[in-house]
Amino acid sequence: MIQDIGFLETVTNFVADRILYLLLAVLLLNILQRRYQKTAQNKRLATLYIAILVLALMVGTVLIVSFDLPDVLFLPLLAALILVGYRFRKKVFPFRLNCRNCGQRLSGKRILFYDSNTCENCGQGE
């Protein structure tokens, strides 16, 4: 268990102050994925699921800070959201770094905007 509760208060305040930027970044990525609507439907939904998890973390953290609730509540909140993300990991995290056929490293564009998770060479062969 964390001995210094002041550290947890610092973390909770830090997250409450800055999590909006993370939410905006995830939603911006989702808007950018709209250009590739035909090839990135699953990944676009995944970024929406991630945005929902970030929003839940934001609401919970802001409630903890605003109502002066114990900062220890941040830990179960975070654990619950991690468990939800892990439970639905195939839908929430479909992003792969390597080609599922040949194992070649994928470009950032292929990672974020193509549901096939294949490199350009393997993608042309399908």
Image: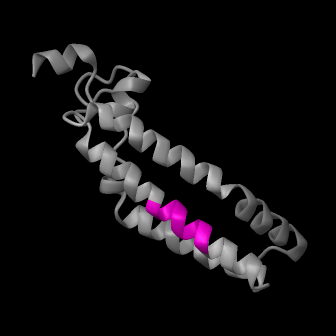
Residue 72: percent from left, percent from top: 74, 80
Toward the left, the furthest residue is 126
The boundaries of the magenta stretch are 52-59
| Residue at image coords 19%, 18% | 122
Residue 83: percent from left, percent from top: 47, 69
Q: Is residue 48 above or below residue 53?
A: above
| Residue at image coords 71%, 61% | 15
Toward the top, the furthest residue is 121
Nearer-the-camera pick, 120 or 62: 62
Q: Is residue 74 above or below residue 124?
A: below
Q: Is residue 64 above or below residue 41?
A: below
Res 52 quadrant in image: bottom left
Residue 92: percent from left, percent from top: 37, 55
| In-image side of 22 versus 91 (left or right) | right
Main SS class of the magenta portion in the image:
helix
| In-image side of 39 versus 95 (left or right) | left
Residue 35: percent from left, percent from top: 31, 31
| Residue at image coords 67%, 79% | 63
